[in-house]
Image (tube, grey):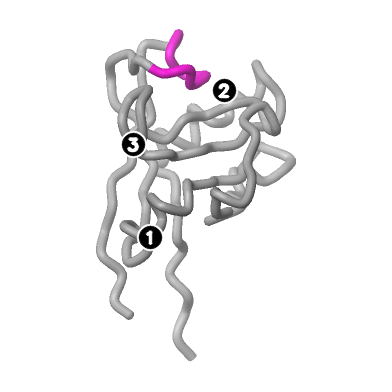
């Protein structure tokens, strides 16, 4: 039986930052639009602060050790069409992004890396 490859995963550094942000802001969510505000960087918001709708796809409910509830990861449907063949790996890099993501004041930013997933 073939094991399903996760659509989205967090690096250890990203999971650590999610735990820190969860402690400060409560339940969290990610949204990756591919538009303005830091290009296609994943933005982290308090859960429900970014309104999703029919133009968005729920890619994952990420379980993070030490975080009670899953962290949802959304992407705009148009962006998903371009990235549907990839596994998204959320990482953290130094530097402040130009968006409204919760990690901005911490001097780091989330970044999505990708790997092609074979059909």
Considering depth in this image, is 95 or 65 the residue closer to the camera? 95
Residue 82, relative to residue 29: is it above or below?
Answer: below
Circle 1 is placed at which residue position?
81
Secondary structure under badge 2? helix
Considering depth in this image, is 36 or 7 the residue closer to the camera? 36
Q: Position of residue 54 (x, y in %)?
A: 61, 51
Q: Position of residue 115 (x, y in %)?
A: 26, 59
Secondary structure under badge 1? helix
Q: Badge 1, how many Cα within 10 Å: few under 14, some, many 20+? A: few
Q: CA distance from mark 1 to mark 3?
A: 14 Å
Q: Badge 3, how many Cα within 10 Å: few under 14, some, many 20+? A: some
Residue 20: which quarter of the image? Answer: top right
The residue drawn where x is 68% and y is 32% is 47
Sequence-first disc among 2 and 1: 2
Circle 2 is placed at which residue position?
20
Secondary structure under badge 3? loop
Q: CA distance from mark 2 to mark 1?
A: 32 Å
The residue drawn where x is 41% and y is 56% is 80
Q: Is residue 105 left or right of residue 115?
A: right
Q: Position of residue 104 (x, y in %)?
A: 43, 14
In the picture, which quadrant includes the C terminus? bottom left
Q: Badge 2, how many Cα within 10 Å: few under 14, some, many 20+? A: some
């Amino acid at each position: 039986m073939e094991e399903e490859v996760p659509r989205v995963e967090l690096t250890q550094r990203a999971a650590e930052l999610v735990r820190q942000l969860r402690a400060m802001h409560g339940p969290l969510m990610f949204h990756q639009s591919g538009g303005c505000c830091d290009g296609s960087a994943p933005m982290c918001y308090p859960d429900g602060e970014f309104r999703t709708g029919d133009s968005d796809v729920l890619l994952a409910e990420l379980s993070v050790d030490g975080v009670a509830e899953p962290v949802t990861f959304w992407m705009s449907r148009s962006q998903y069409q371009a990235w549907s063949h990839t596994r998204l790996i959320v990482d953290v890099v130094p530097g402040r992004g130009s968006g409204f993501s919760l990690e901005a004041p911490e001097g780091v930013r989330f970044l999505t890396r990708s790997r092609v997933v074979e059909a």
